[in-house]
Amino acid sequence: MTTETIIYLGWFGDIILNPNGGAFADETVDAIISIEVQPGQTFGDINSSLDSYVTGAGQGSWEARGWYNETSFTTPGVVSTLWTDNDPLSVGSILYLGWFGDIILNPNGGKYSDTSTSIPVVIQPAMTNADVHALFEDATDSAGLDYSDWVHENEWGESEGVVSTVWELDSSSIPSNLYAKWTGELKFNANGGELDSDSPITVQPAAKFSSYSSSFPIAEYPGWDFNGWYDMGTGFATPGSVRDRTAIASEIISHHSDGKITLYTGWKGKLTFGANGGNQVGPSIFTGIEPTDTLNGLSRFSYNDPTFDSWEFRGWYSENDSGVVDDLIISNTAYSESFGELFDGLDSTDLELHAGWFGDIILNGNGGNFGFDDDLPIEERIIENVQPAEIFSKYFIADNEPVYGNWGFSDWYDLGSSATSPSLVTGDALLGTAAISTLTDSVTDDSELILFAGWFGDIILNGNGGNFGFDDDLPIEERIIENVQPADLLSAYLSENNEPDNEPWGFSGWYDEGSDFETPGIVNNKVEFDEETYVSSLTESLNAGDAEDNPYIVLFAGWFGEITLNANGGTFPGVDVNENSEDDTTLTLMIQEEMTLDDILGLLEYVKPEFGDWSLEGWVFESTLAESQIEGIGFVEDWGNLIDGDSFAPANEIFAAWIGSAAFDASPGYFRADEELEILSGDQVYEMGDIQPGQDVSDRVPFAFYGGHWLAGWLFDDDESTRWPLFFGENGQIVYADWIRNSSGGSNPTGHGTIIDPITGSAAEGGEYIGVDDTDDGSGDNTQDPETGYAGDTGSSGISIYLLIFALVVILLLIAGGVYYYKVMKKK
C-alpha cells in the first residue's frame, strides 16, 4: 500500500497588535507587534495566545482590558468595538489594545434615587474631559442624584467632603473615587449693622464656615463690637439677639444648611452703670450686651434701678460733669426700648452710663413775693429738674430773688419741709458754691427741696432826747439792733432791756414816725405789740439800705408826763375828760417832752375851758399870776408872760388867762378926750378892753366930768352899788357913773343914793366930797383927783398947764440971748 502523504501548503500572514497609547513589554510606547496568523483563523483562535501581550502591556495606572477592532482609528484613541471570538482575522488586521480605568462616583453627601451609595464609571485614557464629564453626567442623571437644595454642578473632585480641585482627565493616573461637588448660596445679614457688600457667596456643604471667612463681607455697627456670625434659622427677625446661639465659624456648613443659608452678625458691648451719688442695687457692670437688649431684659441678670434717698431717678445719662448729667440715653420710661436705638452713635463697646437724679427746688418768699398775678402775690417759685450735684449758685441768681418791701435779702435757708411762711430763718445760709446734695436729707418724698428766703434789717432805737447810758461822758442817743428778721417777735427787741432813760419823763413806748423825724420831737404813732406781734408789722416803715448800711427801721422813744391845766375860775365841761381831776376846774393831761402850748391845746380841740363869757387869752405859769380881787382867781400883770414856746416839765400846772371888756357909762357926764384911749370929746361911754376877772382896773378909768357934780364912783346894775377897788367878775358888764352935786347929801342925777367909800369899800357916813368945777374953765378951784376921779385937793390942772408953757418960753428966750451974746462978743 502506498502511503500517500499529502503535503499542504501553509499560508500565513501577519496581523498587528497596537498598544493604543500604551506599551508592550520591553517595548516603547506605541510600538506595534506583528504576529502570524493563518487564513480562516478567527480572533477566538488566537485570543488566548494574546494574553501575554495584554498582561505585559502597560500605560500608567490604566488597565488593558482586551483588543478592539476599530476602523479609521487614530491612536491613542477611544476604543469601542471589542474583537469577539468569531470575528475572522485577515492579513493586516489591527488589534488595538483597550485601556480602561474604573472610577467610583461618590455622591459626597448626596444620594442616588436607586439608593446606590456610589456609581462606577469606566473611562479610557484617550477620552477628553468632555467625554468623561458627559459620562459622569449621564451616570448621575440616570441615577437621579439629589442633595436637597444643594446644587450639583456636575463637577467631581478628588477629595472627600470639600471638593477643592475639580478632577480633570490625566492619562497617567486614574483616581479610584471622584466626589460630587455640591454648592449652595450663603447670604449675610448685618443684624442691625451694615455690610460692605450684600452679595452672597458660593459654598460647599462639607466645608466649615471659617474656610470662607476671607470672602465674608465686612460688617459694622457703630459703637458695637463684632461678635461673630450666627445661624439663626428661618423666621429670625432682625435686629435680634444671638445670645442663645453659638458662633458657627468652626462648624460644617451642611450641619446648618440645606443649600440656602443666611448668617447673622452678632454684636456685643459692655455697659457700666454708675449710681452717681446714689446706691447701686445689684451688679453695675454688664458685659456681652447686645443692641437688642433692653433694661427690662437685663432684669434677668439682676439689674435694678439705683436709689438716692428721696431724689427722683429719671434714667441713665451718657455725660457726667462732676455729677451733673446730660444727654439722656435711657429714660426711666424707656426700659422696653432696645439699646441699639438708645445708644445710637455712642461707643457701646465700653459704655458708662450715669444715674440721673432730679428734684424740684421750691423757693418760698417767706413773707416776700416774686411779683403778682391778678394782683395776688406770687409767694413761691418752683425751679424744676434740679440735680443734686449742681451748685446752688446756678439758681441763686437775682432773677430768682423775691422782694419783701425794703427788707434786705440775705440768702436761702433750709428750715425743713414742715416750716410755714413766715418763718424765722436759723442755721447757716446756703453758700452759692455748695452742692445741692448737701441738703439731701431735706428732700421730701415728692423730690422737693423747700428753701426759705432770709430777710434782714436793722432796728434803730432812737432815744428821742433820752439816752442808753454814757460813753466817755457822752450820752448814747441810739441803739442799733442788727440783722433783725421780719419773722422775729417784736417783743424780743422792744423789751425793758432796750428802754432808754430821760428823767424826769416817763417812757411810754416806741413810736414809728419815719426816718425824717427830727429829734427830740413829739411822737404820735405808737407801735402796739403783744407776744405774738412780728417785726414784719413794721415792713412799710422799713427804709432801704445801701452798700454800707442795712435796711433799717427807726423807732423813737416816747416820753410822757402829767401836766395840770387850771381853768383859773373857769371849768372844763364834760365828764370823761375830768376823770383824772378831783373837780371840773382842773384837767390833767399826758404830754410829751417837746410839746409846745399849741400841741397841748391841740389836745383840747373838743374840750376847752369855759368861764362865763370871758375869752381865753392864753395860759401862764402860776408864778406869773397876781392875786385878784376874787378869791381863787389870778390875773396876768404882764401879758408878756403868756406861755409861748416854753417847755414843760412833768407836774407843771398852767393857768388859763381870761380876758374881756367892760363899758363905762358917764352920762349925763362926759369923758375927756384922750387920743391914746381913742376917746373923742363928748363921748359918754368908754369901752375898756383887756379886763381880766377880779383885776383892779380903778387906775385905768379915764377922766369924766359933769358940771356942778362930783364922781362918787361907778355903779353896777346888779347891786346898784359902787365897788372899790373897781373889778369885774363877768365879761361885758356895764357900770354907770355915780354923780353927786357939789353939796353934801345932794341929789345924784343917776338916781343912785348909796356912796361907797373908795378906801374901805363901805357906805360913806358923813363924809364930805369936794365938788367938781362944772365950768371946767381952769380956775383950779376944787378939782377932781386925776388918779381916782374923785374929789381931791390937788389944785387946778388948768393953771399948771399955763405955768408949764410960760416956763418953756422963758427958757427959749434965755437960750437965744446967750447965743446972740456969744456971737457978738466973739467978733469983738
Image: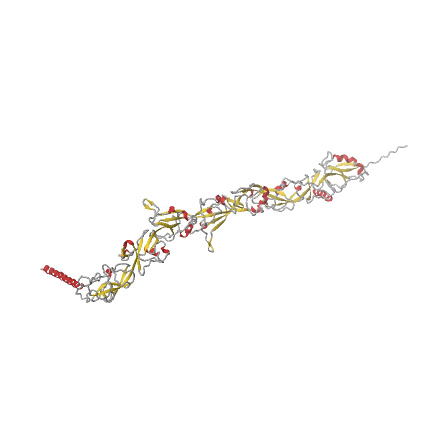
Residue 89, image x and y in percent? 79, 39
Image quadrant where one finds the N terminus: top right
Residue most extreme to the left: 828
Closest to the observer, 139 or 720: 720
Q: Is residue 144 left or right of residue 307?
A: right
Closest to the observer, 646 or 111: 646
Residue 4, image x and y in percent? 88, 33
Regarding residue 183, the answer to whether it shows in the image is yes
| Residue 577 in the image: above or below residue 329 | below
Q: How many marks?
A: 0
Closest to the observer, 769 or 665: 769
Residue 523, image x and y in percent? 36, 52
Q: Is residue 12 left or right of residue 437?
A: right
Image quadrant where one finds the C terminus: bottom left
Regarding residue 125, the answer to whether it shows in the image is no
Q: Residue at x 37, y 56 (%)?
A: 576
| Residue 551 in the image: above or below residue 799 | above
Q: How is the image coloured?
A: secondary structure
Residue most extreme to the right: 1
Residue most extreme to the front: 765
Residue 245, image x and y in percent? 63, 42
Q: Residue at x 17, y 65 (%)?
A: 779
Q: Choose top left, top right, bottom left or bottom right for residue 781.
A: bottom left
Closest to the observer, 559 or 441: 559
Q: Is residue 645 left or right of residue 484?
A: left
